[in-house]
Image: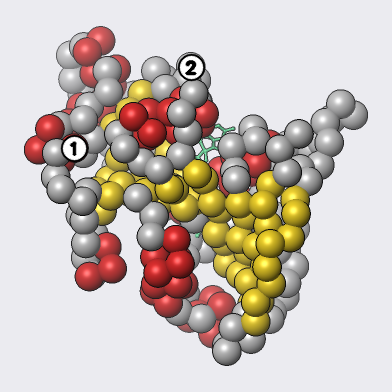
Amino acid sequence: MDKPKVISYTLASIDGRITLSPETLLLIEDERWEAVAGNSAEVYARIFSKFKPDALLEGSGSLVIPNASVEPLPAIDPDPSLYQDYLPAEITSTPDRKWMVVVDAKGLVRWMYKEFPGDIWAGFYLLICVSPQTPPTYLAYLRRELIPYIVTGTDRVDLEQILGKLASLGVRNIVSTAGGRLSGALVRQGLLDEIWVEYFPAIIGGTTTPSLFSTPNLTPEEKPALLSLMDCQILPNQHIVASFTVVKE
Ligand SMILES: NC(=O)c1ccc[n+]([C@@H]2O[C@H](COP(=O)([O-])OP(=O)(O)OC[C@H]3O[C@@H](n4cnc5c(N)ncnc54)[C@H](OP(=O)(O)O)[C@@H]3O)[C@@H](O)[C@H]2O)c1
């Protein structure tokens, strides 16, 4: 199957933590994070200038706190056609359109923006990845809001199929800025081509604080994912950017 190049880029403390606690969403700015990790807008600026991605990939965990109560959606009459991809031509045919792809099979995220504010986000449109188990009320909500979505998988979304569908939409170069669980699933499924980690000089600690690449434990049959160092760069702000290719076995 045709597949875009997928790069993962994550900002992490030296102990591999990607946020301050399980309840801290970096989206809602936290001055303690900014004090040690720097300004996230600068990180995105680095990502855009370095990779010029056609799409960014995120998981619902970056947008909704675990077990948070979500705003209920109005009931609807069942309609199987909701489970077909929704790709309105007025968005897919927009010249130079780029995608902000978000995995949200449970239908948790309520969207404030469909296009994002700020010059850096110009041309990015939301594209939500859902599954046949996503509540129909959520799919109806996305259609009412003219938010495109693609349906894959059975219970969860099928990450490989998502990449195939993105390739057919013309996406060649994706940067995943996802949290640990989605990044972990991508690496375990062998879907990442490159891994970039920007380490900042601090230790956050914690026992359940989200970290880089969290996955189920290795089974006796599974092996660690092997990487090969591409580069290691020290930034003026004392961050260390280490980049690796993923060795395909
Ligand atoms: N420092 C950084 O660079 C950085 C970047 C991004 C996020 N963060 C922080 O990281 C935290 C979120 O990380 P997280 O690990 O909780 O969330 P996450 O990476 O967004 O992972 C959860 C999402 O991934 C999906 N997922 C996980 N495994 C999957 C699989 N095998 N197949 C299909 N879908 C799968 C989940 O789907 P289901 O709902 O179906 O399980 C859910 O949508 C937040 O605090 C955020 O602020 C930090």
Q: Is residue 41 above or below residue 60?
A: below
Answer with the quarter of the image where residue 128 lies.
top left
**What residue is pinned by disc 1?**
92
Residue at screen point 21% across, 62% down:
122
Q: Is residue 81 above or below residue 57?
A: above
Badge 2 density bin: few <14, some 14–19, many ≥20, Cα 10 Å: few
Helix, strand or loop at label 1? It is helix
Look at the image and tell me whether residue 130 can be seen: no
Relative to the observer, which residue lies in front, 23 or 120?
Answer: 120
**What residue is pinned by disc 2?**
154
Q: Which scheme is used to colour this image of the protein?
A: secondary structure
Residue at screen point 54% across, 85% down:
35
Helix, strand or loop at label 2? It is loop
Q: Is residue 41 above or below residue 151?
A: below
Q: Residue furthest bottom?
A: 236
Residue at screen point 28% across, 68% down:
120
Quarter that holds the C terminus: top right
Nearer-N-terminus badge (2/1)? 1
Tell me the CA gap for discs 2 and 1.
25 Å
Relative to the observer, which residue lies in front, 105 or 229?
Answer: 229
Residue at screen point 34% across, 29% down:
168
Q: Position of residue 94 (x, y in %)?
A: 14, 45
Q: Residue furthest left?
A: 90
